[in-house]
Image (cartoon, rainbow, N blue to C red):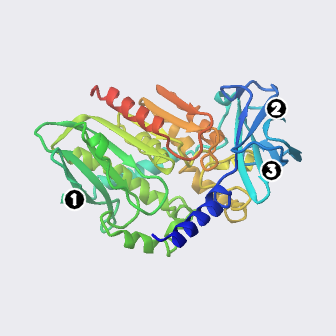
């Protein structure tokens, strides 16, 4: 490289990175003053905002903040100019079980950063708003009865590229609750002779299938990753990218006017039939079966476990679909937020409210009878902690809980590690 090019590159580097066009010149952090982020009813919460400059100066920052129950309009809004360092904000309190959220935006010049912190007020006392339909059990038993008369018609296609010296990977294709209605997934089975425990993993929201669970399958565990949409799970990525240009990404809103037409009826049926897939395998030990999922998958883990007693344990991380009607009672409801301000005009009608009650995770959680591991964060804006506690609090079976107070809507390494450890311990595998 000649000197002219060298100095040009150096100049560009200084302009875009050192001088802050692309570089961050400050960061912010916000927490409640209680280390566990938890308060008693009526107890005052103070939010602590820390502004840290990479190159300390005496510059002014503009801080704007809103405080109120999570996912609800703010009850406090204010702004002021501050210096870097620690800023304290009086957040008030809550007089009922729930979560109080502080959203802070800090700006200097063109740089703006936003963070949230969410204080919990006796969350173990949060009660659901969802009503249990009188024929809830009959409705789901009716669906399960179809599985008894429709053959599974299981087809396993080896996937050499994903198989290892220890496991064979298959594309799974099986019949759902009616002829011609197929479900799909990715299965891994240990190669060596023996009978093994199994884990069914349910997917988060979206239209791309999972690639399988190679980590836990290496522990001599059968794994089945379910794909919930009516397409094979082994297509090229371009196929799923093209699905993004259709109406399919809005599947969670399809058919809400009737309990028989809602999209998740077919989805839940496919999840239940996945249990039949596991029980059809000669390598399955016939006893140890766990359900596992996060977000939408966490909801499906609870739902499937509630409906099929052959599942002996479950993991649900930040489960969605909990307490849909929370918004109709002036508090946060579960994903996909049918009744928030954006969606309320479309779904706040007697037909949808009634139909969706058959799919509310709260009503499945009431019937969980096996041990479970549950984990979520207080800063989750997709699956709000108020909605999750609505379901968690009605579970009477043994339950382990792991809270990440600052956790948002993503899966953290410590959650994954604890999930693996909990499942392996439950299976008595080292």
Q: Residues within 10 Å of mark 3 (few under 14, many from 20)?
A: few
| Residue located at (37% from left, 30% from top) | 421
Of labels 1 and 3, the one closer to you: 1
Instruction: From the top left corner, tell me how far across and down residue 215 is, in percent.
Output: 31, 42
Where does label 2 land, which residue?
Answer: 93
Residues at discs 2 and 1 in contact (Cβ within 8 Å):
no
Q: Closer to the N terminus: mark 3 or mark 2?
A: 3
- Label placed on residue 396: none
Residues at discs 3 and 2 in contact (Cβ within 8 Å):
no
**Spatial CA span between label 2 and label 1:** 56 Å
Q: In which quarter of the image is the N terminus?
A: bottom left
| Residue located at (50% from left, 40% from top) | 412
**Spatial CA span between label 3 and label 2:** 15 Å
Furthest toward the left, the residue is 193
Furthest toward the front, the residue is 3
Q: Can residue 91 be seen in this view?
A: yes
Where does label 1 land, which residue?
Answer: 161
Side of 75 where 330 appears, left or right = left
Of labels 2 and 1, the one closer to you: 1
Q: Quadrant of the C terminus?
A: top left
Q: In this view, does 247 lie above or below 172?
A: below
Q: How crowded is mark 2: few (under 14 residues within 10 Å), some or many (20 or more)?
A: many
Instruction: From the top left corner, tell me how far across and down residue 128 is, in percent.
Output: 65, 39
Instruction: From the top left corner, tell me how far across and down residue 77 is, in percent.
Output: 87, 47
- Label placed on residue 73: 3
Q: In which quarter of the image is residue 43?
A: top right
């Amino acid at each position: 490289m000649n000197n002219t090019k060298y100095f040009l590159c150096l100049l560009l580097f200084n302009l875009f990175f050192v001088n802050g066009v692309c570089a961050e010149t400050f960061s912010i952090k916000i927490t409640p003053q209680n280390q566990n982020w938890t308060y008693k009813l009526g107890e005052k919460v103070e939010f602590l905002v820390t502004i840290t400059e990479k190159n300390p100066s005496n510059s002014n920052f503009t801080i704007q903040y809103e405080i109120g129950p999570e996912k609800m309009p703010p009850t406090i809004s204010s702004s002021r100019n501050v210096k870097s360092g620690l800023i304290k904000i009086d957040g008030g309190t809550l007089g009922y079980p729930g979560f109080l959220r502080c959203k802070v935006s800090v700006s200097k010049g063109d740089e703006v950063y936003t963070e949230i912190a969410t204080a919990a007020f006796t969350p173990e006392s949060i009660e659901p708003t969802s009503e249990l339909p009188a024929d809830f059990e009959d409705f789901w038993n009716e669906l399960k009865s179809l599985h008894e008369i429709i053959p599974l018609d299981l087809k396993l296609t080896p996937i050499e590229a994903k198989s290892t010296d220890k496991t064979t990977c298959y594309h799974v294709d099986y019949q759902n609750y009616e002829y011609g209605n197929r479900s799909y997934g990715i299965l891994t089975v240990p190669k060596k002779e023996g009978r093994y425990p199994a884990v069914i993993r349910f997917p988060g929201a979206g239209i791309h299938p999972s690639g399988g669970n190679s980590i836990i399958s290496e522990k001599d565990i059968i794994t089945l990753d379910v794909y919930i949409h009516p397409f094979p799970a082994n297509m090229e990525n371009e196929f799923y990218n093209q699905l993004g240009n259709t109406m399919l990404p809005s599947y969670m809103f399809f058919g809400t006017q009737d309990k028989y037409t809602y999209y998740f009826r077919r989805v839940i049926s496919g999840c239940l039939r996945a249990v039949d897939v596991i029980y059809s395998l000669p390598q399955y030990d016939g006893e140890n079966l766990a359900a596992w999922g996060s977000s939408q998958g966490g909801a499906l883990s609870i739902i499937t476990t509630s409906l099929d007693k052959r599942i002996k344990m479950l993991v649900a991380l930040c489960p969605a679909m909990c307490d849909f009607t929370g918004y109709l009672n002036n508090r946060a409801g579960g994903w996909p937020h049918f009744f928030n301000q954006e969606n309320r005009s479309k779904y706040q009608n007697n037909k949808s409210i009634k139909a969706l009650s058959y799919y509310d995770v709260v009503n499945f959680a009431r019937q969980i009878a096996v041990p479970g591991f549950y984990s979520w964060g207080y800063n989750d804006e997709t699956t709000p902690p108020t909605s999750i506690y609505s379901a968690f609090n009605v579970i009477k079976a043994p339950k382990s809980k792991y809270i990440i107070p600052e956790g948002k809507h993503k899966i953290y390494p410590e959650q994954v590690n604890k999930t693996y450890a909990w499942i392996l311990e439950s299976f008595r595998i080292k």
